[in-house]
Amino acid sequence: MSAVAEILSELESLRLIDPHSHINPHSASSDTLADILGYHYYTELSHSAGLPRELIEESGIGPREKVALLVPSLSAIENTAQYSWLLEMCQVFFGFEESRIDESNWEALYDSSERTMQAQDWELTVLEKSGLDQVYLTNDFDDPLEGFDTHLYVPCLRTDDLVFQLQKQETRDRLTKASGVTAKDTGSMRRALGALFDHFVANNAAACAISLPPDFAPQKIADQRADVVLNKVSGNLPLDDAEQQDLSCFVFWSLAEQCAERQLPFDLMIGVNRRVYESGVYQGQDLYDKRVSLIQYRQLFNAFPQVIFPTSVLSETSGQELVSYAWIFPNVVPNGHWWYSNIPVFIEQDCRSRLQAVPRTKQIGYYSDMYKLEFALPKFAMYRRILAKVLATDFVGDRGWSVEQAVDLGRQILRGNVETIFSK
Amino acid sequence: MSAVAEILSELESLRLIDPHSHINPHSASSDTLADILGYHYYTELSHSAGLPRELIEESGIGPREKVALLVPSLSAIENTAQYSWLLEMCQVFFGFEESRIDESNWEALYDSSERTMQAQDWELTVLEKSGLDQVYLTNDFDDPLEGFDTHLYVPCLRTDDLVFQLQKQETRDRLTKASGVTAKDTGSMRRALGALFDHFVANNAAACAISLPPDFAPQKIADQRADVVLNKVSGNLPLDDAEQQDLSCFVFWSLAEQCAERQLPFDLMIGVNRRVYESGVYQGQDLYDKRVSLIQYRQLFNAFPQVIFPTSVLSETSGQELVSYAWIFPNVVPNGHWWYSNIPVFIEQDCRSRLQAVPRTKQIGYYSDMYKLEFALPKFAMYRRILAKVLATDFVGDRGWSVEQAVDLGRQILRGNVETIFSK
Amino acid sequence: MSAVAEILSELESLRLIDPHSHINPHSASSDTLADILGYHYYTELSHSAGLPRELIEESGIGPREKVALLVPSLSAIENTAQYSWLLEMCQVFFGFEESRIDESNWEALYDSSERTMQAQDWELTVLEKSGLDQVYLTNDFDDPLEGFDTHLYVPCLRTDDLVFQLQKQETRDRLTKASGVTAKDTGSMRRALGALFDHFVANNAAACAISLPPDFAPQKIADQRADVVLNKVSGNLPLDDAEQQDLSCFVFWSLAEQCAERQLPFDLMIGVNRRVYESGVYQGQDLYDKRVSLIQYRQLFNAFPQVIFPTSVLSETSGQELVSYAWIFPNVVPNGHWWYSNIPVFIEQDCRSRLQAVPRTKQIGYYSDMYKLEFALPKFAMYRRILAKVLATDFVGDRGWSVEQAVDLGRQILRGNVETIFSK
C-alpha cells in the first residue's frame, strides 16, 4: 500500500468534530433529495448554467417537482467539485450505483432515497456513517437554544446582525427581547451583549462568529463617540457612513471584549460582499473583492492577545497573509477552507502552506459549512484525500517522515486542534 | 497508453476555432522568419535580455538582417515558454531538426523556411496543419471588413479607441467617416455606434471586444450628464478626469446596450495599463496593476443579464475572482489565458480551478491572441497538453471518470463552447 | 538514476555565492546552539505556539538556559520548513542522528555541538561544508567595513535608515559622522551620500540595498521642494506626512542616482510593514499588506535604465508582477524568495514562473537572508531540491531538454547570474 493510501486509510477511521456549520438542530438531516439539491451550491450553479431563478424559486413547488426541475441542469455542472459531493452522497447514503444522475434515473433515486430518509433514526445514521461526534452550529443571537442536545449540536453565537444591522429597528427589538436590555448607550449595549453571552455560554457555546465585508477594518471607538451614535440609532435617526462604520466597530469591539472575558474564541470569516448579484438565487448572490488585507485587523489582533481568532478568508489571494499572520501572532489560527476557496485546487495550496509554516497546534483543518447533515461526509472526504496527499508528498516523501508521524499530524489538524482550541 | 496520452491524442485530432486573435486577414501567414521573430514576445524578451530597442526597431532593416540581429539573443531566452513555441513552429512547419536555433544554423533555417512560406497555398497549409476551421479577428471599428472570407476570418469589433480615445479629434473623425453620423450628443452617439454594429453584424461579427485598464469601473451615466460631456468633446474643449471617466463609461455602456440589442457577446479583457515601460519595444510597453477586482463590474453584470461577457483577466491573482463570478453570474464566462498569464504555470492553475467550479458549458478554454497564423499551432498545443494533464489527474485519477468522459469535457472546453457561446 | 536525482547531484557539487545575508563578519558562525535557535524564525514560531515573549527575551538568560527554554516548543513547530532547517543543520554539522530534537536528547546535542563549534576553524569548516565562496552582507551605512576580508564577506550598503529615519537626529548625526558632511540641503545631502558610496565602493561593495513598505511609491522630487523639507529636518522641525514622504522619495532617488553613477545594482526588497505585532519577539513583529503593486515603481524603472534592480517581493501575490516586469524591463531582475515567501510551496510557484517567462540571464535564484553562517546549508539545500524538481519536470520532462541542458540552466540561476549581475 502506498504512503498516501496508508495515511488516508488511517484518517478515514478518525471520528470528527465539525467546527462550523449552518445546521438547524431541529431538522438536521434531509427528508428528501430536494433538501440536498436545494443547497445553494446546486441552485446557483444550475442558475449560472441557464436555469431561470423564477423556476427554481417558484412558490409552492414540491420536493419531487424541484428535483425534476434541477436534474436536467446537472449535466452542465457534473465537472464541478460540488457535483462530486452530490454523487458521493447518493452512492454512500442511498446505494446509487450509476456514474451520473440524469433524466433516466433520478426518479428511482428519488424514491429509494426518500424511503431511506424516512427511517426514524436517519439523523443518527448520517452522524454515524459520517463519523461525526459533534457539529457546531451558527445560531442567531436571539436563538433560545432549546430543544436539542447542545453537546451534540454545539451552539456558536452569530453576530453579523448585531454588527452590521443594528440601525434596523427590527434588530434592536430582537436584541431587547433576547437580552432584556434596551441598548441605547455604551453601558446598556455592553449589558445587552453580556446577557447574550451569558445565555450562550450557559448553553455550551463554543465560539462567537461573524462574517465580515472586505472593507471592514475594526478599530476601538471611544465611548463618548459611541454614545453619540447609539443615541442617534435608538432615536431612529439616520446615520451617515462614518457613523454607521463607528457603530459597527463599537459593537464588534465589544464582542471581542466579551470573548476575552469569557475565554471564548471569536471566529472571523473575512471578505464577503453581500448581494452583489441581486437577481441571483437565495444564498447565491454574494461575492467578494480580493483587495482586502489582514493588516486591517492589526489593531484587533494586538488589542486582544487573550482571544483566539480562528480565521477564514474568502479569497485564495489572502491565503499567504493568513499563514504569515498565524506564523507570528499567537492568537491567529487558520480555519478551514471557506466557500469559493473550498475546491481542491485552493485547498491543496492552503493546506501545504499552512503545514509548512504555521505551528501544528494552531491549525483547524476543515469545517463543512453545511446546511444539511449529509454534506459533512463528502466534504470531509474531499479534504481528507487532499490532506493525505500533501502529507504523503511533502512529509513522508520530501522530509522523510514515517507514515505514523504523518498520520499523527493529520489527526491533530483534523480533530485534535478542534478540541484544544474550542475546549468543548 | 496512459490516460494523459490517450486524452491528449484525442484532443489533438480535434479541429479548432480560435476565438481571439490579431490576425490581419489580408496577410494572415508569415512571409519570412522575421514575421515570426518580430512577434513582440521575442523582441521584448530579447530587449529585456539586453538588446537595445534602437537596433531592433532600426528603420529600413530587412527581414534577414532582423533575424540575424535577434538570433544571438535567443540563447538568453531559450528557457521561456515563448521560445518553446518558436522551436515547435520551426520543427513542425519547416522541418527544423536541431534543439536550438543559434548563430550556426539560423541561415539554413531562414532559407528553407522562406522557400516553404513562398508556396502559393502557404496560408491554407498553416490552417490545415493547425487544424483551424475559423479564426476570430480583432478589427478596428472603422475596418471596411472587405476582401476576405468572414466565415473563415470572423470579425470582432474592437472598441478601445471609442471608449478611451474619443477625446481625440482623429478618433471622432474616424467614427464620423465609418458611421456616417457626427456624434455630438447621446442620441447621435447611439446612432453612430448603431451604424458600426450594423456594419459588423452584417459582416458576420462574432463579438464586440475591448481591453480595459485596472482602474476602470463601468457605470451607467445619465444622458443629461453625458450630453454635457459629449458637447464639450465635440467642441474640442478639454475634459477633466471626471469628465473623461464619464465619457468612457457612457460609450462603454452604450456598447453593452448594442450587444444586448443584437445578442452579441462582449469580450472583456480586464486589467492592462498601457505604456508603462515607455522605452520598451513596439507592443512591449504594457503592464498591469494587480489591484483590480471584478467587483468593479458588478453594476455591468447586473444591468445586462442578456449579454454574455467572455472575460479575460491579465493578473493571475484575478483567476479565482473570475471563477467565482462565473460560478453565480450566468452571463460571466471565463475566456482563455491572457498575455502575462499565458504560461504553463498559470494556465494550469486557472484550468484546474475553472474545471472544478464553473459549469462546463460556460468555459472557453483557449485563444491564441496571435498576430501571425503560425502561432496557433504551438500555443494551442501547449494548452492542450496542460488540459490533458489536468483531465487525466483531476478527473480520471481523482474522480474516477472514464477517459471518454474526460475527452468529452476537453472537447467542449476547447471547441464546443466556442460554437455555442458565439453561435457562429 | 532519475533526472531529478541527476540534476540535484550536479547542483549539489556547485560552489555558491550567497548574494544577501545579515551575517556579522566579525562573528559569522555560531558559538552555541543558542545562536542557532535564537534565530527569529524559531523564537517567533515558539512564541506563536504559546511561549511568552517575556521568557524568551528574559535579560541575562544564558545560552544553555535559552535552548532549554525553547526545546519544549519544538514539538509544536516540527511540521514547519524552518524546523527542517534546524534538523538538517544538526545532522550535517553536529552528527545528530535522531529524527526529533526534544527534552530527552537536546543536552547531548548541545554539548557535542558546543565542542564542534569551539574548534578554531569552525567558521571555515562551515563555509567549506556549505560550499560558500562568498557571502554578501547588509551593512549599516556608517559601518567602517574594517577587520574582515571584503572579498569573502562582500559589503552591501543598507539604506533603510537614510530613507525612512532621517527625521531622527540620531540618524543625521550618524550620517554626518560617517560622511564628514552635514546634510542640510540637496547639495550637501548628495555630497554626504556620495561619501558613503565612495567608502563602500572602495571596500568592494556589491550593491546598495533597501527594504520598503507596501505603500511606498518612489518619485522624483524637485530640488526646490526637497531643499525646503531638508531645511526643516535639519532645523529639527516636525514634518507632516507629505513632507516625510517627499523626504523619503528624495533620499531614495538620490541613492538611485549614486547607483547609476557607480554602476552598482540597487537591491529592492518590496513590501514589509514594520512593527505590526508590537508585542512580538525581536525581529518577529513585521508583516505586510498584500495590496502593493510594482506599478508603484514605474517611474523609477523608467528613470534609471542603467541601474540593475535585483527585486524581492514579500507577498506571493506579487510573484507574477515581478515576472511580468522582468519580462519587459531590462533592469528588473527577480531576486530570491524572501521571508514569508521562503517556504517550498511559494518557492516552487515562483521558480516555475520565472523559468517559464524571464530570460535565463536575469534571474538570481536564491539568497539565504541568514544571520548566522550555518543557515546557508539547509536553506540552499531546500532551494536546490525544488529547483532540481522543476528542471526535471518542466524542462527535461515537458520540454524534452537533456539533463545537461537543465543542469546548465540550474547553474546559471544558482551561481552564474550572481557573478554577472553583481560583477564581484
Image (cartoon, coloured by chain):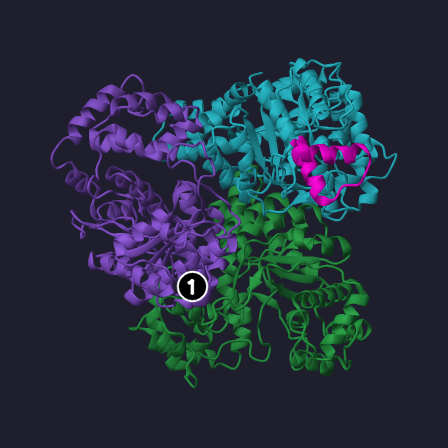
Chain colours: A green, B purple, C cyan
The answer to whether residue C32 is above or below residue A412 is: above
Helix, strand or loop for the magenta stretch, by majority = helix
Q: Position of residue C354 (x, y in %)?
A: 47, 34
Residue at horizontal 81%, vertical 66%?
A223
* Chain at tag 1: B
In the foreground, C132 or C218: C218
The amino acid type, in three-letter code, at marker 1 is: Asp
| Left or right for C360, reference A332 | left
Q: Which residue is mark 1?
A: B227
Q: Residue shown at 70%/36% (left/top)?
A: C247
In the image, residue B39 above or below residue A302: above
Q: Is residue C230 magenta?
A: yes
What x and y, as percent, mark residue A104?
A: 28, 73
Q: Tell whether position A405 is magenta.
A: no
Q: Is residue A8 left or right of residue A194?
A: left
Q: What range is drawn magenta here?
A: C223-251
Can the viewer see residue B53? Answer: yes
SS at badge 1: helix
Residue A56 x, y percent position in the rendering = 40, 77
Q: Is residue C98 visible?
A: no
Q: Is residue A37 above or below residue B97?
A: below
Q: Residue A290: x, y in percent?
A: 54, 54
Q: Quadrant of residue B384?
A: top left
Residue drawn at x 32%, y 71% is A72
